[in-house]
């Protein structure tokens, strides 16, 4: 792969005008297709599980009870100033408003609160129900606004009108502000990293090309494929984050080559061949993990996985084709200026910070293994006159293959180490203590996850100022929380001797169950011998007691069949939420096993080591657990939630754990590959395990830090979203990347490698012969540019 990418990078550099024209044409084609075939107006936010009990019942209701099969809205009338909704003037206004609502677009039926007896005990609140024959996703763009306008006439002095209900749930959220914030923060971090606005702008420009192609391409499919607004936003945030990060890795390698005198064309080709190989590998892990979400069997989740996978795949293509073309246009202008801080930094990475090794990479030692340092403590120094050994008089031995170092593992020229290397030296000085601290801190952060509750978001987590949230809270307060999520029980009485009596007995049986507030009168369809029964729970839709009630009704179906001859199915938005959560819970463990197994296999192939994959998997589990604990702490327990606009607590979105597993797995592999590949490269050249760890920090630490900060900032920018689900996903990904990059990859990983030393890079000979050599570091492409000065060590001749 490195050789192919090297040729591809050179071709793109030479044919840069054609490559740029090709990508401009792709973006234009995606825009045209979106305009012609799709668009944001056709986004589908419906939750469904084909084959589930709730979905089968909904499908049957489309024929038997069409006015109940679609979504519904609630109109909440609240009398103020000491009045009651039953007062003649107020009731007249309510009836007029309901008449206007019946003529609103797509409304199938309006149920008056006076007929349904949905009036609060104190007479101040009445709730009317508006039924549609289509799901929420099939409503016209202005249907709900038209409903609000139709009833606004009743919103006068002495009465307030709020419109809510399931029809308003999962509404698309605007994310353009998040895009701008994320790009702006990324540009600032890149400018600080490179010290050049031109260099910083290149990853942003290429990432925008990729995101535009991915998003417009996905929106062009909305006319034929169900794609949710959350899927669009997830693809946007992931595509933007990985697009910038992938370009950052390649540009930083290119700039390093330029700083050491390499020609721009060869530099770009070599950067794509080396760093680009890691980009391809890391990108494919994200694509595989996100595509794996399709096996769960939930269309909503499938669309999210495929949209995100497409965005990442396009980001990889942009990084390996368009990016070298842009580097061709930039030419030598990306070379750090002589004497600039950026040039000094690149020179330091390539020169003064290198391990003290000879030209062959062997440790400094005599052929006989004798000590280089005599008992007098003479210095073994290069041109700088720095002392090689510590005051303890440690010998520089050839037999062990260790570098010139003290017992602490300090390298020669350690004073020139950058911040990342200094941090690695600190955490590897006491590796066991570091591991204990990491595991203990992440374990404490993960603890709240043991009490995690999963459910689909409802209007109870909508913004407090929104109409649907006000209606939700009012209904729960005045009529009971169960009125916000009624259950629908579909009874098939075709095998009953008396269908009407059978339906009534079914309703009575359900009414006797715990947590049932009220059971409506069965609505029968004599033609199909079915009856529909509305059940109002005592508890809120997301309350665990409501889930228990759904399962209790289903568990009693055998007794109901025996007593009445009727079969029953439970459906409605609350039952759908229960089924989605159950489906995702059953898929979580197998999916996690596949993801972790995949990480072990891929890292085994890349690093040809047993310890590295096992360490990566353990770190991944720690970061996942800690992230879920943080999510529960903020969104379910309310800790520090006000800082990110969380004004009410509630369950965690059912989709979040499995999405987090897929996304964080791929992103964690990014940092693992970019950081550890430089360590392995150094170890293969020097044979010094501790020096290799420090070398990896010196070469990749700053770039990985910048990449993690960029990705965290992009995800965190989406915390401004009004969508609770998107806000939870954004927080989880931002916290997950932050924890995985800085606590796991930059702390846990070097500590494990320092503790295991040579064993970290060991692989049984029989297994090594059978594994393909992926050459992820691009060793076959030839050596990287030599540093201007190496740290040469010669025995002192002074006696």
Image (spheres, rainbow, N blue to C red):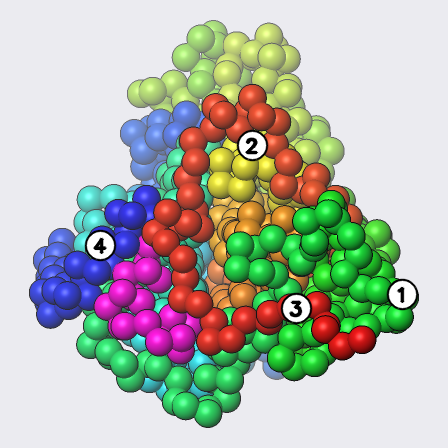
Question: Which mark is on residue 8?
Answer: 4
Circle 4: is it few (<14), some (14-19), or many (20+) Cα within 10 Å?
Answer: some
Q: Which one is in front in this view, the residue at disc 1 or the one at disc 2?
A: 1
- Is 174 rendered above or below residue 480? below
Label 2 sits on a secondary structure element that is helix
Q: Please give the residue where the numbered disc 3 appears in the rendered image.
A: 794
The percent coordinates of residue 128 (x first, y second) are 46, 56
Q: Please give the residue where the numbered disc 2 appears in the rendered image.
A: 597
| Residue lying farthest to the front in this orientation | 799
- Is 458 rendered above or below residue 180? above
The percent coordinates of residue 137 (x first, y second) are 32, 51
Residue sitting nearer the eye, 287 or 705:
705
Residue drawn where x is 58% and y is 60% of the image: 358
Range covered by the magenta-colored residues: 255-273
Closer to the chain start, of discs 1 and 4, is 4
User: Left or right of 237: which side holds 479?
Assistant: right
Residue 472, picture quadrant: bottom right
Residue sitting nearer the eye, 704 or 314:
704
Q: Please give the residue where the numbered disc 1 appears in the rendered image.
A: 375
The percent coordinates of residue 450 (x first, y second) are 76, 44
Q: CA distance from mark 4 to mark 3?
A: 43 Å
Label 3 sits on a secondary structure element that is loop
- Is 62 rendered above or below residue 714? above
């Amino acid at each position: 792969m490195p050789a192919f990418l090297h040729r591809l990078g050179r071709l793109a550099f030479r044919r840069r005008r054609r490559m740029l024209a090709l990508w401009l044409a792709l973006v234009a084609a995606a825009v045209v297709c979106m305009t012609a075939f799709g668009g944001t107006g056709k986004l589908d936010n419906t939750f469904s599980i084909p084959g589930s009990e709730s979905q089968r019942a909904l499908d049957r209701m489309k024929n038997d009870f069409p006015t109940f099969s679609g979504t519904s809205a609630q109109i909440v009338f609240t009398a103020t100033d000491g009045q009651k909704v039953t007062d003649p003037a107020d009731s007249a206004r309510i009836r007029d408003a309901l008449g206007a609502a019946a003529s609103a677009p797509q409304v199938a039926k309006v149920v008056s609160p006076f007929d349904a007896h949905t009036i609060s005990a104190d007479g101040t609140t009445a709730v009317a129900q508006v039924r549609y024959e289509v799901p929420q996703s099939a409503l016209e763009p202005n249907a709900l606004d038209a409903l609000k306008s139709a009833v606004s006439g009743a919103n006068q002095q002495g009465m307030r009108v709020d419109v809510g209900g399931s029809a308003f749930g999962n509404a698309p959220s605007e994310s353009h502000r998040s895009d701008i914030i994320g790009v702006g923060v990324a540009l600032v971090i890149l400018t600080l990293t490179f010290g050049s606005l031109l260099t910083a702008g290149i990853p942003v420009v290429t990432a925008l090309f990729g995101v535009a192609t991915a998003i417009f391409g996905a929106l062009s499919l909305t006319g034929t494929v169900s794609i949710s607004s959350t899927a669009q936003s997830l693809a946007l945030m992931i595509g933007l984050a990985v697009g910038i990060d992938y370009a950052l890795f390649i540009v930083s390698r290119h700039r390093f080559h330029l700083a050491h005198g390499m020609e721009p064309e060869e530099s770009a080709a070599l950067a794509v061949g080396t760093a680009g190989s890691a980009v391809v590998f890391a990108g494919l892990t994200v694509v595989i993990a996100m595509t794996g979400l399709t096996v769960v069997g939930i269309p909503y989740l499938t669309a999210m996985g495929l949209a995100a996978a497409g965005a990442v795949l396009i980001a990889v293509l942009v990084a390996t084709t368009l990016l070298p073309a842009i580097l061709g246009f930039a030419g030598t202008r990306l070379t750090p200026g002589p004497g600039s801080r950026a040039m000094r930094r690149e020179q330091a990475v390539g020169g003064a910070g290198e391990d003290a090794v000879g030209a062959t990479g062997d440790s400094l030692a005599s052929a006989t293994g004798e000590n280089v340092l005599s008992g007098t403590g003479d210095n073994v120094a290069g041109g700088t006159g720095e002392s090689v050994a510590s005051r303890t008089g440690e010998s520089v031995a050839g037999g062990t293959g260790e570098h010139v170092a003290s017992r602490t593992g300090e390298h020669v020229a350690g004073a020139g180490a950058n911040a990342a290397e200094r941090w690695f030296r600190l955490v590897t000085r006491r590796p066991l203590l570091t591991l204990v601290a990491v595991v203990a801190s992440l374990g404490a952060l993960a603890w709240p996850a043991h009490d995690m509750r999963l459910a689909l978001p409802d209007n109870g987590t909508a913004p407090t100022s929104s109409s649907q949230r006000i209606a939700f809270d009012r209904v729960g307060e005045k009529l009971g929380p169960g009125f916000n999520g009624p259950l629908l029980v579909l009874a098939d009485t075709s095998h009953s001797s008396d269908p009407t009596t059978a339906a009534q007995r079914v309703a009575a049986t359900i009414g006797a169950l715990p947590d049932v507030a009220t059971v409506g009168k069965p609505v029968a369809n004599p033609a199909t011998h079915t009856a529909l029964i509305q059940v109002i729970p005592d508890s809120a839709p997301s309350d665990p007691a409501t889930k228990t009630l759904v399962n209790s009704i289903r568990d009693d179906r055998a007794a109901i069949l025996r007593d009445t001859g009727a079969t029953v199915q439970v459906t409605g938005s609350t039952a759908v939420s229960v089924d989605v959560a159950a489906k995702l819970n059953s898929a979580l463990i197998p999916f996690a096993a596949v993801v972790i197994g995949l990480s072990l296999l891929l890292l085994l192939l890349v690093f040809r080591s047993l310890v590295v994959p096992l360490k990566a998997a353990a770190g991944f589990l720690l970061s996942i657990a800690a992230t879920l604990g943080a999510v529960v702490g903020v969104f379910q327990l309310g800790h520090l939630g006000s800082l990110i606009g969380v004004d009410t607590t509630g369950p965690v979105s059912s989709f979040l754990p499995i999405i987090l597993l897929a996304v964080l797995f791929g992103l964690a592999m990014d940092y693992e590959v970019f950081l550890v590949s430089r360590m392995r490269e150094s170890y293969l050249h020097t044979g010094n395990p501790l020096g290799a760890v420090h070398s990896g920090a010196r070469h990749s630490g700053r770039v990985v830090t910048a990449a993690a900060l960029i990705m965290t900032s992009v995800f965190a920018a989406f915390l401004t979203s009004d969508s609770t689900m998107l806000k939870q996903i954004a927080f989880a990904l931002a916290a997950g990347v932050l924890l995985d990059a800085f606590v796991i990859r930059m702390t846990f990983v070097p500590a494990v490698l320092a503790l295991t030393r040579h064993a970290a890079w060991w692989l049984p000979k029989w297994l090594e012969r059978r594994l393909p050599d992926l050459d992820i570091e691009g060793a076959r492409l030839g050596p990287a540019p030599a540093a201007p000065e190496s740290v040469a060590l010669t025995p002192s001749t002074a006696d």
